[in-house]
Image (cartoon, rainbow, N blue to C red):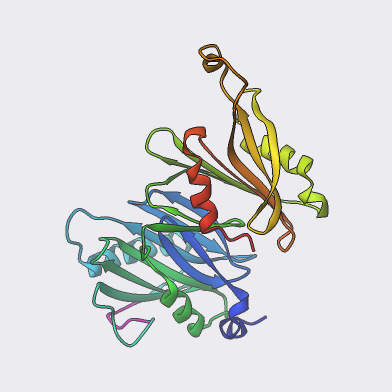
């Protein structure tokens, strides 16, 4: 399929969200690498063969001239080209690629460069959130599509419009309050596991994996939950109940009360649900969400803006 066809068929695109930055890309492009924090970071989006998008962001303490940032980047490109024995052509323009007018809350500078790779990019500073974002779309060889460049860069957002931050990558798509910071995100060919933390011990874990048609079986969901979310303690996942989660067959985890508390009180053991797992037949995936025992409401918040298909 040609990229021109991709831009015309909105069913073939999807959104990638990371650290409050979102961008809409063709469906076969995926997040390949990410590092940094909400303050400073970088991520790269690839297709099946090559890098396609690079995005960098920072929160400079002082006012930064965008042309200075562009000249620094040009110096870096020239060093790389000289090292690889290539010639580079670089151009800078205040005219945005994305639209005929610049938003009032942004200072925008656009650039392009070419070696054996062709790139169109933009650098801007958002007056609302203070972020400086540099993004570029890459094409290799004779593969060029300026209309796709405009569509991708026009879809790029540097901060969420509400207190909910969209995280969308590696088969997972959900929104969380901005107090949650990503602690770990492990992506494999058939599974993903993301761990978030708010303050000291307010932990939230979200995971998914490919599953067969028997993925809705409660016993299979329990095994998945044990393998991907279990941390410690033999009491974890001792009890569960079946229930509908996002209109899918699923289970709710339960945990026995800690032994040290049982010694201080009389009566039966009290069970505490603190997570859910379910199977989505449309995606052929199992999903699981777990929060700390004292903060079970975080599971509900994650489910409120959770997209499984």
In this view, which residue lies farthest toward the left? Answer: 62
**Where does residue 231 sit, x and y in percent of width and height?**
59, 30
In this view, which residue lies farthest toward the bottom? Answer: 100
* Left or right: 76 in relation to 168: left
Please tell me whether residue 128 is drawn above or below residue 5 in the rendered image.
above
Q: Is residue 258 visible?
A: yes
**Where are the magenta residues, as a range?**
90-97
Picture residue at 52% right of the left edge, 33% below the top: 293
Q: Nearer the viewer, residue 186 or 264?
A: 264
Q: Nearer the viewer, residue 227 or 187?
A: 227
Whether residue 34 is in magenta: the answer is no
**Where does residue 52 sit, x and y in percent of width and height?**
53, 68
Picture residue at 59% right of the left edge, 18% below the top: 267
**Where does residue 253 sit, x and y in percent of width and height?**
64, 38
In this view, which residue lies farthest toward the front? Answer: 267
Q: Hey, which quadrant is residue 8 in on the image?
A: bottom right
Q: Nearer the viewer, residue 110 or 217?
A: 217
Considering the image in quadrants, where does the N terminus appear?
bottom right
Whether residue 96 is in magenta: the answer is yes
* Left or right: 140 in relation to 224: left
Considering the image in quadrants, where does the C terminus appear?
bottom right
Picture residue at 34% right of the left edge, 64% below the top: 133
Picture residue at 33% right of the left edge, 76% below the top: 110
Q: Nearer the viewer, residue 64 or 200?
A: 200
Q: Hey, which quadrant is residue 6 in on the image?
A: bottom right
Q: Is residue 190 visible?
A: no
**Where does residue 209 sit, x and y in percent of width and height?**
69, 49
- Report the number of discs: 0
* Left or right: 177 in relation to 270: left
């Amino acid at each position: 399929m040609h990229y021109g066809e991709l831009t015309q068929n909105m069913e073939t695109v999807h959104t990638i969200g990371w650290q409050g930055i979102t961008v809409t890309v063709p469906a076969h492009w995926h997040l390949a690498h990410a590092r940094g924090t909400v303050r400073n970071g970088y991520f790269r989006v690839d297709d099946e063969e090559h890098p396609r998008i690079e995005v960098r962001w920072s929160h400079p303490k002082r006012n930064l001239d965008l042309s200075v940032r562009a000249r620094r980047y040009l110096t870096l490109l020239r060093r790389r080209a000289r090292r690889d024995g290539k010639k580079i052509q670089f151009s800078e323009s205040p005219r945005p690629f994305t639209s005929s007018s610049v938003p009032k809350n942004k200072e925008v500078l656009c650039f392009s460069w070419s070696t054996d790779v062709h790139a169109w990019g933009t650098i801007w500073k958002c007056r609302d959130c203070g972020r400086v974002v540099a993004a570029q779309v890459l094409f290799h060889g004779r593969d060029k599509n300026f209309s796709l460049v405009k569509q991708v860069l026009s879809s790029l957002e540097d901060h969420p419009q509400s207190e909910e931050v969209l995280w969308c990558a590696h088969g997972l798509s959900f929104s969380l309050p901005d107090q949650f910071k990503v602690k770990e995100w492990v992506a494999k060919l058939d599974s993903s596991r993301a761990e978030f933390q708010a303050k000291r011990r307010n932990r939230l874990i979200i995971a998914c994996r490919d599953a067969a048609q028997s993925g809705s079986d409660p016993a299979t969901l329990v095994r998945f939950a044990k393998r991907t979310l279990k941390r410690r303690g033999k009491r974890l996942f001792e009890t569960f109940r079946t229930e509908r989660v996002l209109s899918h067959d699923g289970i709710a985890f339960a945990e026995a009360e800690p032994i040290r508390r049982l010694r201080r009180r009389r009566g039966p053991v009290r069970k505490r649900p603190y997570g859910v797992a379910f199977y989505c037949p449309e995606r052929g995936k199992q999903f699981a969400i777990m929060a700390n025992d004292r903060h079970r409401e975080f599971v509900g918040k994650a489910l409120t803006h959770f997209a499984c298909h």
